[in-house]
Image (cartoon, coloured by chain):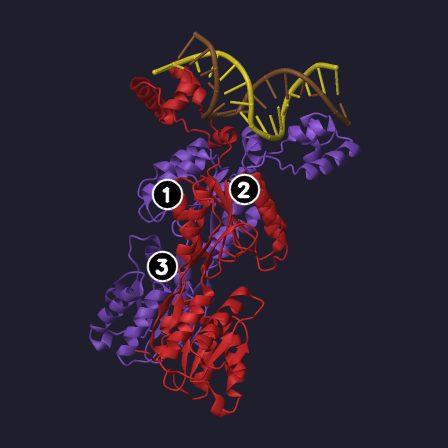
Chain colours: A red, B purple, C brown, D yellow
Amino acid sequence: MAKRVTARDVAKTLDISTMTVSRALNDKPNVSEITKQKVVETSRRLGYFPNHIAKSLVLRKTDTIGVVVPEITHSFFPGIVSGIEEICYEKGYHLILAHSAEDSEKEHDVIYTLTSKQVDGLLISTAQTVEDYTVYKQIIQRGLPLVFYDRCVKGIGASCVSIDDEDSAKLITEHLIKHGYSPIAHLAGPSRVLIGKMRMDGFKKALIEHKIAIAEELIIEAGLQETDGYRAMQKIFSLPESSWPRAVVAVNDPAAFGAMKSIYEKGLKIPEDIAIVGFSDDIRAQLMPSPLTTIRQNAYEVGKRAVDKLISIIEGENVAIEDIIIKGELIIRKSCGCR
Amino acid sequence: MAKRVTARDVAKTLDISTMTVSRALNDKPNVSEITKQKVVETSRRLGYFPNHIAKSLVLRKTDTIGVVVPEITHSFFPGIVSGIEEICYEKGYHLILAHSAEDSEKEHDVIYTLTSKQVDGLLISTAQTVEDYTVYKQIIQRGLPLVFYDRCVKGIGASCVSIDDEDSAKLITEHLIKHGYSPIAHLAGPSRVLIGKMRMDGFKKALIEHKIAIAEELIIEAGLQETDGYRAMQKIFSLPESSWPRAVVAVNDPAAFGAMKSIYEKGLKIPEDIAIVGFSDDIRAQLMPSPLTTIRQNAYEVGKRAVDKLISIIEGENVAIEDIIIKGELIIRKSCGCR
DNA sequence: TTGTACGCGTTATCAA
DNA sequence: TTGATAACGCGTACAA
C-alpha cells in the first residue's frame, strides 16, 4: 500500500500549519484567498484525500446511516433502498446496508455493529420473527435517531414510514362496490402478518361504510403465494353456486394470479363472470390474459421519506415523532371490468 | 444524546487501565480470567460499546467494503448485493452501498467519497457511460483492493467476476441447432454494450462450430427492451417468407417477449412455426402462453465470489489477478419445442 | 499480568 | 489571518 498523504504532508510542503490546510479545504472563513489557492493546488498535486474516519472521530459524526433490510431481494426493497440511496447522496450521507435475513437474532447483531460503527442514525424494517422490542427501545433511549420503514413498531417513540395498506384495500374494494359488484369475496393473507390484517380491515371497512353485510364465508384466510390464492378460490367454488361472488379482492397480486387460474379452470370469464383485483402491481399483472387491476405501492417514495425524516432528526430540524403514510395508487385494468 | 460510555469509563470504575479493558474485550492474552470477567460484566452494566471509528483510525482498517452499483433496482443487482452482504456478514465486514445511477460522473464522485471513508476494498460494476478508466487505475495504483463484478474493465490489473455471456449464448444456440432448427435468427442487443457483443459472439460461435453459414440478414441489432424485440421481429417478417427463421435467439427475455408478440400477431405458433429462446430468466418467462426457454444467471453467486475474492485480497491471501466466470444455466421450457 | 506514553489524522479552541 | 495545543477513543510498544 502506497503511503497515505495526510494534511500534515500538505502543510509541510507549503510550510504552514495543518489547521490552515483544514480550513482551506473546508471552505472555512479566516483563510486568505492566496493560501487557499495554494493549498487546493498542492493537495491535488500530492494526491491528498481527507481521512473521513479521523474527521468522524473528532466531530462525533460519521455522515453515515445504517439501513437494516429484512431481505433485499424481496419485491419492493430494492426500490426502497434506491430511494434511500438517492437522498443520502444528495444530502452527503452514506449508507451502510445490513441484512437481517428475516431473523431477529441476526437483526440484533447487525444493529449492534451498526451502532459500533457510530452511524448517525438507523433505518429499520423489522424482521418477521421479531417479538422483543428492547433493542429498539435501547436505541431510542440512547438518543440515536431511528426511523422505521415499511414494517414498523409503533408506540415506542420512533417515527415510521409505511404503505397505507388499510386505506388502499378500502379504496380498491370501494372501486368494486361503486361499479355495482355484489357479493364481493376476499382472499385474505395470514392474519398474524400485518399486511394481511390491514388489508382485511380495509376490505371490511369499505363494506361497512357502504352498508353491505359481510359474508364471512366469502372471506378466506389463505396466504401470500400463488398456490394460496388458487386454493382459496377453489374453496369458494365449493360453496353452493348461488353464493359465489361477483367480484374478488385478493390480498396481493400473486394470490390473484392463483385465483385467476382457478376461475379459468372453472370455465368462467374475467371480468364478465367474476371480476378480480390484486395488490402491489407485480410486474406480471399487466401481462395476464385479463390484465389485473391492482394497487401500486411507491417503494421509492417510502425510502425517500424515511431518510428525509431520519436526516431531519439527525440534523435536529424536525424531531417530532410522526407516522408517515404513503398512499397507494389504484391502477385500473381490465380484470375489474370497470372500463 | 446521552453521554458515550468509553473504555476509560469502564477502566475508571474498576480502577484499572484502559489497556486492560481493551485486552479483556478483544480476547488478547495476558489478562487474568478474573479481571476479564469483571471487565466484561461492568462493560455490559455500563452499556459500553467499543467505538469502531477510533479503532479503525489506529488500526488503519475499517472492516468495510464499498460497493458501487449502477442501478439497484435492475434485475439481478439485488441478488448480487444479497450475496455480497451474506459473505460480508460471515467474515465480519460491513458494506457501504453506493449508487452510480449509470452515470460516470456520479460514479467518480461516489468512489471518491468511498475511499475517503477508508474502505478496505472496492467492488465495482461500471456505469454504462464510463469511458475513462483513470479513476480505476488510480485506485489500483494506490494499492486499494478492487474487484469488478458483472460489468468489468479488463486489462488494467483488477480481478473480475462475471457472467459467462458468450458461453451461455453459445450453449442456448447449440441447443436449438441440436434439435434441428434452421435457419436461426438473432435479435441482438446494441453492439457497443458488452452483453450485446458477447451474446452475439456466442451465437455466431455456435453456428461456426457446427459449420452453419451465418445469414447476416437474420441478425438484427435492436435493443434490450420489449419494444426493441418487437420491432426487430417485424423487420425479420419484412423479409421474403422463404428466408424467415425456424428459430430465434433473443438477446434477453424482454426482447423475446416483444418478439413473441410480433410472432403471434403474424398468426404463427410458438414453437410449432417459430421456436424462440431468451436470456436471463425474467420472472415473466414462465408465465408466457408458451413458457420461454432461457438462461438463468446466478446473481447471488456473482456477488458471493466477488466479495470472496476481494476479502482474500484485503487479507493478503490471494492477491493474484483472476477472471472468475459464473456459468449460466439452461432452463428448458416449451418455447423451444424441445420437450 | 498490568500500566504508561504515544500515535492514528483530523478539527476546535484560544492565543499570537 | 494564522498557529500551537489538546482532544476524539482506541491499540501498539515497551516498561514496570
In the picture provided, is B175 more to the left or to the right than A197?
A: left
Choose the circle earlier in sequence order: 1 or 2: 1
Q: Secondary structure under badge 2?
A: loop
Q: Quadrant of the N terminus of chain B?
A: top right
Q: Work out how far the residue at label 1 is from the one at label 3, CA to CA, in angstroms.
A: 37 Å
* Residue indicated by mark 1: A90
Q: Work out how far the residue at label 1 is from the one at label 2, CA to CA, in angstroms.
A: 22 Å
Residues indicated by labels 1 and 2 sit on the same polypeptide chain: yes
Q: Position of residue A289 (x, y in %)?
A: 36, 78
Q: Position of residue A321 (x, y in %)?
A: 49, 49
| Chain identity of mark 1 | A
| Above or below: residue B42 compared with residue B306 | above
* Residue indicated by mark 3: B199
Q: Residue at x 50, y 70 (%)?
A: A201
Q: Residue at x 71, y 33 (%)?
A: B24
Q: Quadrant of the C terminus of chain B?
A: bottom left
Numbered label tally:
3
Q: Residue type at mark 2?
A: Leu
Q: Position of residue B248 (x, y in %)?
A: 33, 70
Nearer to the camera, B31 or A157: A157
Q: Secondary structure under badge 1?
A: helix
Q: Residue type at mark 1?
A: Glu
Nearer to the camera, A96 or B136: A96
| Chain identity of mark 2 | A
In the picture provided, is C3 more to the left or to the right than B87?
A: right
- Circle nearer the viewer, 1 or 3: 1
In the picture provided, is B230 more to the left or to the right than A17?
A: left
